[in-house]
Structure formats: structure tokens, C-alpha cells
Image: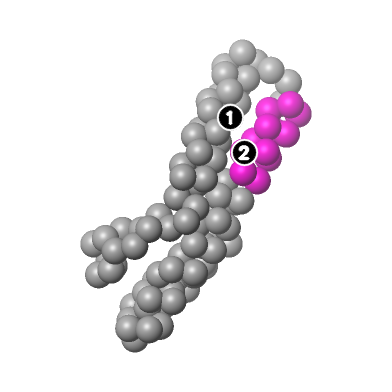
């Protein structure tokens, strides 16, 4: 959720455990989609499952963004760290593509 090479502050995020759990479920789901493809399952079924994985990943991203705003951005505003705000803008641009 955070890269200490870029941030000079240390703090915990309230949703870290939830994000890790959701990532584990998404990874398991994606592995099952891979097996579906390997087994030659119906393309429509595979596409539906791919869509479900994408939705899950997007929801994980929203949780990470919310935590980032509540913690990192608040800290950045308090300390006047403009780089964190620039990095957030860049990350949002990449996330919504």
C-alpha cells in the first residue's frame, strides 16, 4: 500500500488486512479462471469470470485509495509534501485508465 522509498513517514492503514485478504481471494479467483481456459471452458463463462476478477481488483484499488487519502494525503497536507499529492494524481490517472 505504501512504498517507504517514496514516503518519509511511517503509519499503518486500517484496511491493510482487508486488502491482503481480498488480494488473496482475487488471486485464487484468477487462478480458477486460468484453469477454465486450460480446460477449454465456454468463452462466455470465462469472460464473465474475468469481469468478476476485474471488478474485485477495482474494489481493492478503491480501498487502497481511500486509505491513502485518509492517511498519506492528510500527512502530506500537514507537512506540505507536494510530491505525495503529485504522486496521487499520477496514480489516479493510471488507476482509472
Please name the residue shown 29% across and 64% down the image: 10
Please name the residue shown 55% across and 56% down the image: 63
Pick whichever, 60 or 70, lies toward us: 70
49 in magenta? yes
13 in magenta? no
Provide the major secondary structure of the magenta segment.
helix
Look at the image and tell me in which quarter the C terminus lies: bottom right
List x then y, in percent, for residue 5: 23, 62
Q: Is residue 16 visible?
A: yes
List x then y, in percent, for residue 18: 52, 45
Q: Which residue is mark 1?
A: 29
Please name the residue shown 43% across and 74% down the image: 73
Between the residue at mark 1 and the residue at mark 2, the CA separation in whole angstroms equals 7 Å
Q: Which residue is mark 2?
A: 53
Q: Are marks 1 and 2 in contact (CB under 8 Å)?
A: yes
In the displayed structure image, the side of residue 40 where residue 76 appears, left or right: left
Please name the residue shown 45% across and 50% down the image: 16
Q: Secondary structure at mark 1?
A: helix
The magenta segment is 44-56
Amino acid at each position: 500500500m505504501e512504498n517507504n522509498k517514496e514516503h518519509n513517514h511511517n503509519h499503518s492503514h486500517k484496511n491493510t488486512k482487508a486488502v491482503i485478504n481480498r488480494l488473496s481471494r482475487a488471486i485464487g479467483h484468477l487462478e480458477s479462471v486460468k484453469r477454465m481456459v486450460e480446460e477449454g471452458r465456454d468463452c462466455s463463462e470465462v469472460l464473465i469470470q474475468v469481469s468478476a476478477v476485474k471488478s474485485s481488483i477495482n474494489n481493492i484499488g478503491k480501498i487502497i485509495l481511500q486509505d491513502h487519502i485518509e492517511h498519506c494525503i492528510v500527512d502530506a497536507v500537514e507537512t506540505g509534501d507536494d510530491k505525495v499529492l503529485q504522486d496521487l494524481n499520477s496514480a489516479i490517472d493510471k488507476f482509472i485508465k
